[in-house]
C-alpha cells in the first residue's frame, strides 16, 4: 500500500532545468569554458557538492567546491527571482493527493537554501510533511541516501513510497532505496533511458491519485 508521495523539485515542481543550465553557462563563461551537452548530461540530478566537485575536477580548476557552490547559488537565485515558474499541474496534484491522505515530501538535490527559497516564493510549505535537501545526506543522487532519509523522516518504509523524478540519477536513487518511481523525463532525455521506472509519463498533469494507488495494488 502506498502511503507517501515524494517529489523531486527541479524539473518536477518548478520549470528550473533551463535556469540551472543558464546558471551553469554563466558560471563556466566566467572561466572561459564552454558548456557542452556531455557535461550537462553528467551534472543533471547531482547535488551541489557532487556537481561542484565534477566542475572542479573536469576543468582542473584551482577553486574550492564551496566557492563554486556559493557563486552558483548566487547566480541561480538572482535568475529565479525574475524567471522561475511553477509547473502548472503541481498545485492541483498536491491538493488532490493531500485530500486522499497521502503524506507528501520533497527530496531535492538542491541545497536547503535553494529549496527554501522556492517553497517560500510559491507558498508551498504547507503541502509537505518533510523537506529533505542535498545538504541532509552524505551521498547525493544516484545514491539512495536521500530517499531512505526522506522515508525515515515521514515514518514510512521505502516500499510505501512513490517518488516522482525527471532525471536518471533521481530514478536510480529512488529505485535503489526500494521505492516505486514515476518518471516524467526531462525533455532533453529519452524515455528509453527510464526503462527501470515503474511508470513513464509525459507530464505531471498525467499523474492522478489513481496512478499512485495502482502501483501499490500491483
Image (cartoon, rainbow, N blue to C red):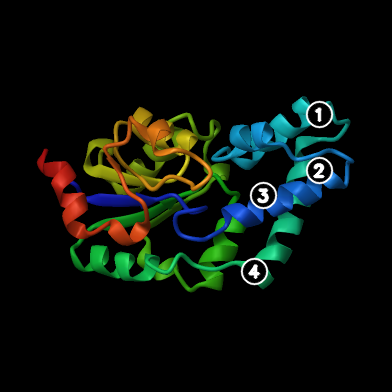
Residue in front for this viewpoint, 58 or 5: 58
Which residue matches tag 4? 83
Label ID, residue 81: none
Which residue matches tag 1? 59
Of labels 3 and 2, earlier in sequence is 3
Residue 184 x, y percent position in the rendering: 39, 48
Of labels 2 and 1, earlier in sequence is 2
Of labels 4 and 3, earlier in sequence is 3
Residue 31 x, y percent position in the rendering: 88, 41
Circles 3 and 2, Cβ within 8 Å, touching? The answer is no
Element on which disc 2 rests: helix
Which residue matches tag 3? 21
Mark 4 burial class by Cα count in 10 Å: few <14, some 14-19, many 20+? few
Which residue matches tag 2? 28
The residue sitting at 84% across, 38% down in the picture is 33
User: Mark 4 and mark 2: span between their CA atoms?
Assistant: 20 Å
User: Mark 2 and mark 1: span between their CA atoms?
Assistant: 10 Å
Amino acid at each position: 500500500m502506498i502511503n507517501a508521495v515524494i517529489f523531486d523539485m527541479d524539473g518536477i515542481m518548478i520549470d528550473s532545468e533551463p535556469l540551472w543550465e543558464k546558471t551553469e553557462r554563466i558560471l563556466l563563461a566566467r572561466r572561459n569554458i564552454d558548456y557542452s551537452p556531455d557535461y550537462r548530461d553528467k551534472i543533471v540530478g547531482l547535488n551541489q557538492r557532487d556537481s561542484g566537485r565534477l566542475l572542479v575536477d573536469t576543468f582542473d580548476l584551482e577553486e574550492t567546491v564551496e566557492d563554486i557552490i556559493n557563486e552558483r547559488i548566487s547566480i541561480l537565485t538572482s535568475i529565479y527571482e525574475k524567471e522561475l515558474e511553477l509547473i502548472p499541474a503541481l498545485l492541483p496534484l498536491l491538493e488532490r493527493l493531500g485530500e486522499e491522505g497521502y503524506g507528501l515530501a520533497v527530496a531535492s538535490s538542491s541545497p536547503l537554501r535553494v529549496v527554501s527559497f522556492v517553497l517560500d516564493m510559491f507558498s508551498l510549505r504547507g503541502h509537505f510533511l518533510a523537506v529533505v535537501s542535498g545538504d541532509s545526506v552524505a551521498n547525493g543522487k544516484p545514491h539512495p541516501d536521500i530517499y531512505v532519509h526522506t522515508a525515515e523522516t515521514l515514518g514510512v518504509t521505502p516500499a510505501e513510497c512513490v517518488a516522482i523524478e525527471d532525471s536518471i540519477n533521481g530514478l536510480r536513487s529512488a529505485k535503489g532505496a526500494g521505492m516505486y518511481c514515476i518518471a516524467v523525463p526531462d525533455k532533453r532525455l529519452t524515455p528509453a533511458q527510464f526503462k527501470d521506472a515503474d511508470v513513464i509519463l509525459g507530464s505531471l498533469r498525467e499523474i492522478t491519485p489513481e496512478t499512485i494507488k495502482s502501483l501499490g495494488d500491483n
